[in-house]
Image (cartoon, rainbow, N blue to C red):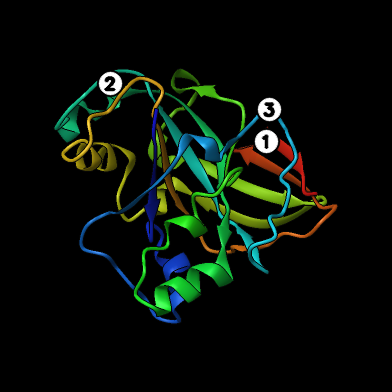
Amino acid sequence: MKIMCVGMNYSEHNKELENTLVLPEEPVIFMKPDSAILKNGKPFFIPDFAERFDYETEIVVRINKMGKSVPKRFAHRYYDAVTVGIDFTARDFQRRLRDKGLPWELSKGFDGSAILGEWVPIEEVEDVQNISFHLEIDGKVVQSGCTKDMLFGVDELIAYVSRFCTLKTGDLLFTGTSAGVGPVHVNEHLEGFLGDRKVLAFNVK
């Protein structure tokens, strides 16, 4: 299985990172290895190769069938569940790599960097393009968003990535983060919500 991730998919997040409004003409795609997955409430251990690790809360879509060059109008047939996930980023390491013009996958794809919550069947979601989600740290809301604000919607993303990579059952699509990303610290407790439903909870060690 593979983890496909979308960068710069919420305009306000792009603005907070770049200090200006950046609107990509096409989806920005990067990958994480399957060793990045962390689930079942296991703790996130802060690695020692960087100083700052930022949470990026987003909706994750689970692919349920094989597909290649999927038309947008049929894309809804290729996923069966959603959840809240966190794309952890070694922010200072990422900036050093980008400043040198180097690939920055290591700042995103390290072990434990793809946090997954409990899956919610797509039948329980009224509209995949109107899902509210938020993250709490120690009971305080630190990030919130709604999929209606995506620059590229879920079906459009599936159609796009399937032009390049064959979708397979069990693949994951991290659909991008909203504004409000920030660092985590040892002993914090994180909880992710799909609407009012808590689907994610873990500790930082």
Image quarter where the N terminus lies is top left
Where residue 52 sits: x, y (%)? Answer: 66, 67
Local secondary structure at mark 1: strand
Q: Which residue is mark 3?
A: 40
Task: Tell me the kind of residue under disc 2.
Answer: Arg
Where residue 65 sits: x, y (%)? Answer: 30, 18
Mark 2 surroundings: few (<14), some (14-19) or many (≥20) residues within 10 A: few
Residue 67: image tag: none
Mark 1 vs mark 2, CA separation in Å:
25 Å
Query: Which quadrant would residue 64 be assigned to in this image?
Result: top left
Mark 1 vs mark 3, CA separation in Å:
8 Å
Local secondary structure at mark 3: loop
Give the mark toward the camera: 1 or 3.
3
Task: Tell me the kind of residue under disc 3.
Answer: Asn
At 62% from the left and 48% from the top, the residue drawn is: 134
Which numbered disc, 1 or 2, marks the residue that appears first in the sequence? Answer: 2
Residue 77: image tag: 2
Query: Which quadrant would residue 74 be assigned to in this image?
Result: top left
Which numbered disc, 1 or 3, marks the residue that appears first in the sequence? Answer: 3
At 66% from the left and 36% from the top, the residue drawn is: 196
Q: Which residue is mark 1?
A: 200
